[in-house]
Image (tube, rainbow, N blue to C red):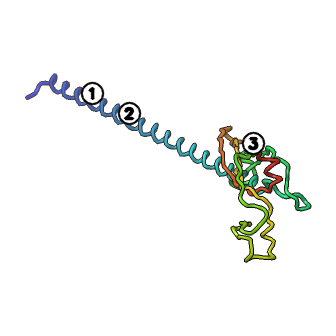
Amino acid sequence: MPSTFAMHRQGGAALIVGLIMLVLITLAVTAGFTLSNTNLKSVGNMQNRNEAVAASNRAIEEVAASLLLPGVDGSPSLVAPQATVSLVDINNDGTIDYRVQIAPPTCVRATKSTDSGGGGNVGPGGITGGASTSGSGLATVPDQYNSVWDISTTVTNDSSGTVTAVRQGVRALLSKAQFEALCS
């Protein structure tokens, strides 16, 4: 028959092993909670970044669509594009979510795309001029330039204050006067 002293010893060992297991389980749960919390923050940050890029792309499309619009009389615009601010409600709930500051677009490069004068000219849409298109007016297509514009934006999330920078290139067809005024 075991003594009372030996039974206490076994009961104490089981208690210590139980406490150690409880501490290990607590550490595992705490680590899992911390890891899931970190992952949640990462996913939230990625979503905010994607929304900021979408807001920036919306603003860049607005600028690209209005880049070098002709004047009221149809003459090509010779006014350099200006810096603008676009307020974007990304989820259409009636409140501004992102403030997009657009730097003045800059002409990075321009290359001549058509020649004036005789036949063999390439007009808009790749249509060639010359004898086969006599009377179409393509033989006198004015000089045009394919230009690439750099549009840089800074997007600020109004609720969190985070800032994201986005740059994009946009191509535009310029007249000779626009090329000389804006890209030379």
Nearest the eye: 86 or 42: 86
Q: Residues within 10 Å of mark 2 (few under 14, many from 20)?
A: few
Indicate the amino acid at tag 1: Ile
Indicate the amino acid at tag 2: Leu
Q: Quadrant of the N terminus?
A: top left
What numbered label is drawn on residue 16? 1
Q: Is residue 135 above or below residue 13?
A: below
SS class, disc 1: helix
* Label located before the other in sequence (1 or 3): 1
What numbered label is drawn on residue 27? 2
Q: Are marks 3 and 2 in contact (CB under 8 Å)?
A: no
Q: Are marks 1 and 3 in contact (CB under 8 Å)?
A: no
Q: What's the CA distance linking mark 1 and mark 3?
A: 67 Å
Q: What's the CA distance linking mark 3 and mark 2?
A: 51 Å
What numbered label is drawn on residue 103? 3
* Label located before the other in sequence (2 or 1): 1
- Rendering coords of residue 13 (x, y %): 22, 27
SS class, disc 2: helix
- As drawn, is 181 to the left or to the right of 100? right
Residue sticking out furthest to the left: 1
Q: Quadrant of the C terminus?
A: top right
Q: What's the CA distance linking mark 2 and mark 1?
A: 17 Å
Q: Are marks 2 and 1 in contact (CB under 8 Å)?
A: no
